[in-house]
Image (cartoon, rainbow, N blue to C red):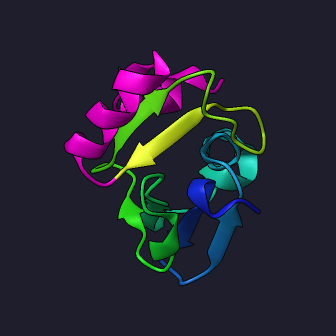
Amino acid sequence: MDDKFGAELVTTKGKVFKFDDIKCMVSFLKSAEGKANEYAFEMVTDYAHPDDANELIAATEAHYCFSESVKSPMGGNVAAFKNETDRVNYLKKSNGSKLDWNEVKEDFQ
């Protein structure tokens, strides 16, 4: 697993689901099993600071970027950033596009 792309769901009953790509988490959320749960937390890793992998970001609060230069494990090509400044700096060099959490969820059908 590449630490830059981790994602995690925690149900209201405390069950934890870990993913190696945001795309995988979104696909799971849309699956029958994913829809059968209620989630206390939907979390993603900060692409700009993967060494802080123990500090996950709420998926709804993260700033997302889609770019072909983001080589995520499952080909989602989406990176999450804790702050807007890191996303803007990455977009300057990657020719990517901004996304919010709702757009990320819509893009992975």
Task: Please say if 27 is above or below 66.
Answer: below
Principal secondary structure, stretch drawn in magenta: helix
Q: Residue at x 34, y 23 (%)?
A: 92
Task: Please say if 99 is above or below 52.
Answer: above
Across and down, in percent, residue 31 comes to 72, 43
Say if residue 101 shows up in the picture: no
Q: Which residues are magenta?
A: 82-109
Say if residue 43 shows up in the picture: yes
Label tally: 0
Using the image as rendered, state which of residue 35 and residue 77 is in the foreground: 77
Across and down, in percent, residue 16 comes to 62, 76
Q: Residue at x 43, y 30 (%)?
A: 65
Across and down, in percent, residue 34 comes to 66, 53
Which image quadrant for residue 89? top left
In the figure, is residue 105 to the left or right of 82?
Answer: right
In the figure, is residue 92 to the left or right of 75?
Answer: left
Using the image as rendered, state which of residue 39 and residue 56 is in the foreground: 56
Tell me the quarter of the image containing the N terminus: bottom right
Across and down, in percent, residue 68 comes to 63, 21
Tell me the quarter of the image containing the C terminus: top right
Residue 107: in magenta span: yes
Using the image as rendered, state which of residue 37 and residue 64 is in the foreground: 64
Task: Please say if 105 is above or below 25.
Answer: above
Q: Residue at x 46, y 19 (%)?
A: 96
Q: Residue at x 43, y 57 (%)?
A: 46
Q: Residue furthest front?
A: 93
Residue 103: in magenta span: yes
